[in-house]
Amino acid sequence: MRRYPDARALLTRAFDALDDWEASFGPFEQHASLAVEEERLAEALDEYLGRLTAPPADDGGNYPFFHPRYAGQMLKPPHPVAVAAYAAAMRINPNNHALDGGPPTGQMEKEVVRDLASMFGLPDDTLGHLTGGGTTANLEALFVARELHPDQGIAFSADAHYTHGRMAAVLRMAAHPVAATPEGRIDLDALEEVLKTGRIGTVVLTATTTGLGAVDPIAEALPLLRQYGVRLHVDAAYGGFFVVLAALRANERGALGLPGFPAEHFRAIAESDSVVVDPHKHGLQPYGCGCVLFRDPSVGRFYRHDSPYTYFTSDALHLGEISLECSRPGAAAGALWLTLRALPLQPDDGLGPVLAAGLRAARRWASLIDASKALTLYTPPETDIATYFPRASSLAQVDAASQAVFEQGMADEDDPIFLSTYRMEAKRLIARHPSLTAEQPHARILHSVLMKPEHEPYVEHLHARVEALADSILLSMSS
Ligand SMILES: *Cc1c(COP(=O)(O)O)cnc(C)c1O
């Protein structure tokens, strides 16, 4: 039977098992210093919960990330299975730095890393580990890129995550931003111009950009990269899990309703030298779970260190020897392990249907926006991120109306909606929408990440709300 799991029930079962485990080591005296004043705690807890659940926006509370009415940034809660698994392991608090810090979660980390590598079609001996997030994972991939090509830099699209430019500076590597098309994909002609200089050791391609949700044409870029003998790093922090759906044949994907999904570019990640994916984005995990993978396991040599604190017993490379971070939560590995057992990395079961629902929601919304008199689609969604703006005639109006929809949407008391804005360069907006007049260098447009499957049945309502807001805002602007 399929049923939506209740985190509370799972947690009770987990804590019962941990009670038994702890009891098996025999009683000991608890120390009085750890006892807390009951009233003080009750008061602090009231304030804590009050702050966590305060109304959003002006009152400084959280936005309802769990609800489909939140369609703004890349934010959603973890799956209840991950919540329970994380809390259970956290009670033991294993440290995945060294295998002895937590043998079970250390082993689970190796297993999930193998699962993620095989999801991308990378070899069985792929080297990898979990990280605190995509930033650290990308930092490690760029660090290896620098060690392999100390005299060369990296190239990435202007739409790549800002972390690449920043981490190149941290690593004192030369960074070469390459123009992106108006749709947000790296411009391969511009990339080739940079490759011709011979200054590039590794190219970073993004499989789902944070802004427009675009996918760099990885399959088309591969011959070019081979021709110039450069490495490929794929930043799939956000979109990596979509590769699960790329395994479907075109007709099967057609039946799922996913036109425009760039499956061949996700499949081409199998050819990359390194990949980053964030289980804390589309892998249903709480924050603190990124992953970096290297095709060539011998790059582990760059991590070598001589720690005086080696309390491990095995001779094998332990996780702390292939990671720049030292202490890392075993709970993150445990939560991902249990989640992938409950929701496997498959196209037609487990994670696949979760991801397909968001992709369909974005396509459905795009078609509603296309048919709307009040809204314009910026560009058809490749993944699950929609970009759109109120149908105005100038950039100043697009900017003002987008901001007004964003603010009025979340200020509504009865039926709020939570969107986000995204700043676009005039040149790009005009390239896709030449009828707009450009009296200013930038304009904000609206940006919705539809990363929850619950968005699929809700998208008609979201659209109706945004359309009504845009209608009234455009009307008031023209009067
Ligand atoms: C989120 C993201 C990052 C940064 O990862 P964090 O997990 O936030 O540290 C890097 N690149 C891309 C494409 C992302 O979506």
Image (cartoon, rainbow, N blue to C red):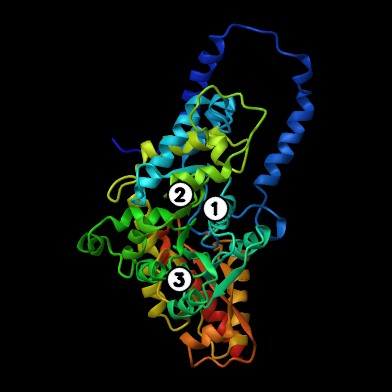
Q: Quadrant of the N terminus?
A: top left
Picture quadrant of residue 400: bottom right
Q: Position of residue 130 (x, y in %)?
A: 52, 42
Residue type at the position of mark 2: Phe
**Left or right, 252 with reference to 451:** left
Residue type at the position of mark 1: Val
Marks 1 and 2, how far apart in space? 9 Å
- Nearer to us in this view, 300 or 378: 300
Q: Position of residue 300 (x, y in %)?
A: 51, 43
Marks 2 and 3, how far apart in space? 45 Å
Residue type at the position of mark 3: Ala
Marks 1 and 3, how far apart in space? 48 Å
The reply to whether dot 2 and dot 3 touch (C-beta < 8 Å) is no
Q: Nearer the viewer, mark 2 or mark 3?
A: 2
How crowded is the residue under tag 3: few (<14 C-alpha within 10 Å), some, or many (20+)?
Answer: some
Residue 204 in sight here: yes
Q: Secondary structure at mark 1?
A: helix
Q: Which residue sits at x=50%, y=52%?
A: 281
Label drawn at residue 144: 1
Position of residue 81 relative to residue 214, above or below, is: above
Q: Secondary structure at mark 2?
A: strand
The reply to whether dot 1 and dot 2 touch (C-beta < 8 Å) is yes
Q: In what quadrant does ligand 1 lie?
A: bottom right
Query: Which residue matches tag 3?
Result: 464
Dot 1 or dot 3, earlier in sequence: 1
How crowded is the residue under tag 2: few (<14 C-alpha within 10 Å), some, or many (20+)?
Answer: many
Label drawn at residue 294: 2
Q: Quadrant of the C terminus?
A: bottom right
User: Does the Cβ of the disc 3 residue fall within 8 Å of ligand 1?
Assistant: no
